[in-house]
Amino acid sequence: MSGELGQPQATPSHAGVDLPNPERNRVGVPGGVIRRVGTPGRRSWIQKVLEQITDSPRQWVTPSKVVPVVVLAVQRYLLEEEPSGMGPKPPLYCYDVTISDGVYQEKCYLDPSLNSLVYKNILRVGIEMRISRVSCIYNEKRVGQGILCIDNVHCGESLDSISVETPFRNSAHQEIPERPLRGGKSHYLALWNNEDPYGDIWITNKEPEEHNFNDTKIISLSNLEMTWSSRRSFPALLVRILQKSKLRYYGKPDRKMIEPYQTFLEVADSSGTVSVILWNALCPEWYKSLHVGLVLLLQDYSVKKSYSLRMQPLPVDPQIKLISTMKISLNVRDPPANIIIIPEKQVKPEWRLPKLNNCFITRSELDTLPENHICDVIGTLLFVGRVQRSKKKESREDFRSYRWIHLADGTSEQPFIVELFSTSQPEIFENIYPMTYLVCTQLKAVRNNEQVPKLLYLTTTNESRVFITGNRGQPYTNDTKVKNFIRWIKTKTSAGEMKNTVVGGYYPYPPVPETFSKYSSSVKVESLLTAISEVKKQIEDLQYREQKRIAIQGIITVIKYVPCVCAPENASASEAQWNANQPSASQAARREGQSQERGGKRRQDNNPVSSQCCHSACASLSPTKKRILQEPCGKQVPVPQPETSAQARGNKRSVPSTSQRRESTSTGSLGKARKTISNKWESQLWREKKFGLISHLHYSHVYPESIPRKFVFEHRNFLTQQYNSQPSKYILPEGRPPKLDDFKSVQSLGHFEVTILGLNHEIAIDVAFFPMYSPEDVQTSQIDTLLTCMNYSCVHPQELTGNDKLQVTKALTGNIIKAATELDRVHIIGILDICSLGNNKTEVYLHKIYRPNKNS
C-alpha cells in the first residue's frame, strides 16, 4: 500500500470511483480511493449511489431515491478513439461534470448521448440537477477503481445560493493539475472554443534571467538561412519577438499526443525576420510568458524548410529582410529546446535588435485606408457586445468565439467598429467592459464602398493582440498617437462617458448589401436559400451563443407593432396617456394565441418575454444627427390595438385604407379627440391560410439577454458575466447579485413582429424586426417602405425623450404599417439572423427584405 491516503499515480485516468476490494483497507486504497467513515451530519447521496453500484450485479443502477444535486463544474476534453478497424471519426469531445450533494463533491463522466445538453447550455454550472441513472466505467489497468458515469438526468433551474465548501469524496479529483477522468490527455480544454488556454497546466511565471554570453556562440538569421541545410548543429539565436499568434489546437481522436498545441512567433535580429514554431508541451509552459517585444536566446532548436501553405504575416518593419525559406522549430525533445528570456537592461546597443514599430491609426484616418490594410488602434470602449460563437468550416464541433466592440479616440464622431475574435487572451477577452482603454494590434480593415450602407469595420487576424492600457512597460506607450489619445481622454469626464456606454444585447452587424445580387456574391455558403421547411432544423442545430444568417423566400402576411414595455422616467404626459389608452401586450398576446389555437394546438412560447425588444448599438460621442436603430426596453407596456377581437374577426377587407387605420379616441377629462395608429396589419391571404398550416414557428420573442443595457460601472463584474459565455466552473457571486432587468435598457421605441408565410402556404414563421431609420426622415415621411427603412446603418442610437419620442414612434409605426400593404401577396426574400441563447431559448430577427424582381 502507498499510505493511508493512497495518493494516485500520475496517469490521466487515475481519478475514479473507489470501488470495494475485500483485500484492501476500506479507508485508504491506492489510486485515489478514499472512504470517509463516520461523516457527521446527513449521509451523502453520492455515497449511497456508489454502494448501490458495488452491490448490483449490473454495471448501472437507477438510484432508489433521486435527490437534487448541484452542478459545480462542466469541463471539456478530447477523448482518443478506441482501437477498431473503422476509419477516423470526427472529434469526440467529452465532459466531466462535478456535482455536490451538500456533503461531498464528485467528478463524474457525462455519457456522450447527453452532450447535447451541454451544447445547448441546458446542463450548466449553478443549476439543480436530478440524476436518475448512473453506471460505472472500470479502469481495467487499476485494481478496484472505476469512473462514475451519468446516464440520465433532468436539469432544473439556476440556484440563487450554492455552497462550494463541500469536500471531494475522492481526493484525486482535487489534485493539481486537474486531469480528465478518461483518455490519455493531461488537461482540459476551454469549454466553448479551442483557442483559449484553460486550466492549471498553463504557466505564467517565466521571468527574464541574466545570461553570461562569454561562452555562447550566436549566429545571425541571414547566416543561418544560407548554411542551415549543411549544418548538423546550430549556434544560438538572439532575437526579439515582433509578433505572436493565437494558439492552434490540432488534437484529433486518432493522434496520441498529450498536449497537441502550436503557436507561431515572428522574431527578428538585425539581419532578418523568421517564423518560430512552439510545439506541444512547450505551449503550456511558455505561451503566457512570451510577450511581444521580449528578447529571447534560443538554443537547441531545429531548422526545417518552410511550407508554402501558411501565409506569413506582414513584417512589422518593412526594412528588415523577410526570411521565408526556413522555419525554426522548438520542441520538448529531439532536441529539447532551451528558451531564455533576456532582461531588457542586459540588451546591448551593438546587438542592433530591431525596435517594435506600431502602425496606429486614428478613426479619422480609417475612412481613407484600403481594404485589408493592417493597423493598430487605441480607444475607449463605448460598446461591448455579448460573446457569440461561429462554427469553423472543418468541424461541426469546433467553434470560434467573438464579440463586437466600439472604440472612440476623439478624432471622429464615428467609433471604430471591431469584430474581436478570441486571441487566446481569455483574461482580457472575458473581462473587457465599457469605459476601459483598449489597444488592439494587427487588425485588418474590411470595407465595401459600393454597398449601401457603406461597409467599414476592423477584424482581428491570427497575430492580433489585445491590451488594457495603463500597464507600464507596454511596447506602444511611446507612440505619438497613443500619447495624443491619452491627452484627449483626460479632457473627458467620467459622467459623460457613463452616459454614452452600452453593454450586451443583440447586434445585427455587419449589414447586408442593398440588392440580392450583391448579397449572393458576398456570401460563401453551399446553398444560398434555405427552404422554409428547413428553418426549424437550422434553428434546432444551433449551439449555445451561435448566431447564423440565412435567406428564405416567402410572403409577409402580418406585421404587428410592439411598443417599448413602459414609459421611461422622463416620458411626457402625452406619451404616457398614448400608451395608457391601449390594451396591454399580454392581452394582445393572449388574443393572438386564442385566434391561432386550432385542434388543441397551442402557441409554443418557451417562457418568452414576448413584449420585450432589443437592439444593441453604441452611443455617439456627440448629439449630432445620427442614423439609428430601434432599441430595446426592459418591461412590459400597453400595446396600441384599436380593433377589438370581434371587429378583427368581422373584418373581411384585405388592406384597410389609411383613414380606417386611424380612429378617434378620447383623451380623458379634456374631451379632445386625437388620432392613434393601428398597431397591426393582417393580409387577406393570412386570414385564408392561417388555420390550414402544417406548422407555425414562433420565434419573434426577444429575451432579456438580448437587450443592450446602460453600463453601470459599480456593477461591471455582474454585467460582464451576464454577457460572457457560461463559465466552466461555478463563480461565487459577490454579495447579493442584482437582476438583469434592473438595469436600464438603451433608448427604445419598440419593435415589430412579422409573420412570413412560405411560398407553398404550408408553413409560417414569426420573426422580430427592428427598423433602421433617421428621425428626420421619419418626420418628413421619407421612410415609406419596409425596404427603405432597412437601408440604414445600425451603428449609433440617438436619445429621444418626451414628445419627440412619441412623434417618431407614431410616424414610424404608421409608415411601416402603411408600407406593409405594398407587399401584400408579393414574393420576398428575407435575410434572417437566428440566435441561440442556450437553455432552449432562440430568437429570429428579420435583417433585410429583398424583392427579387426589383432588387436584382
Image (cartoon, helix red, strand yellow):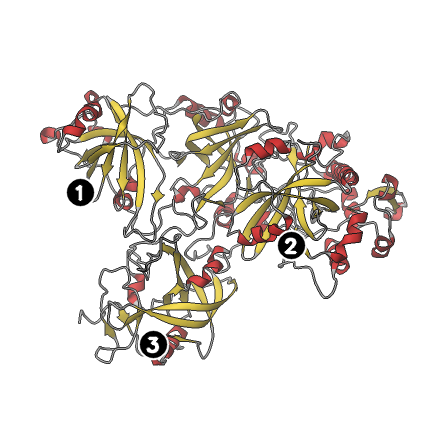
Looking at the image, residue 598 sits to the left or right of residue 428; the answer is: right
Nearest the camera: 284 or 824?
824
Three-letter amino acid code of the residue under disc 1: Asp
- In screen coordinates, is 202 left or right of 507? left
- List the residue tagged with mark 3: 39
Q: Quadrant of residue 320?
A: top left
Of the residues under marks 2 and 1, which one precedes in the sequence? 1
Residue at the spot x=15%, y=32% of the render? 234
Q: Which residue is mark 2?
A: 609
Residue type pointed to by label 3: Thr
Label 1: which residue? 334
Q: Is residue 80 left or right of residue 351?
A: right
In the rendered view, would you say 633 is above or below 161?
above
Do labels 2 and 1 touch, CB within 8 Å? no
| Residue 264 in sight | yes
The residue closer to the viewer here, 290 or 31, is: 31
Q: Quadrant of the N terminus?
A: bottom left
- Nearest to N terminus: mark 3 or mark 1: 3
614 vs 415: above or below: below
Mark 3 or 2, closer to the camera: 2
> Mark 2 or mark 1: which is in front?
1
Query: Which residue is at 66% across, 48% downward?
Result: 767
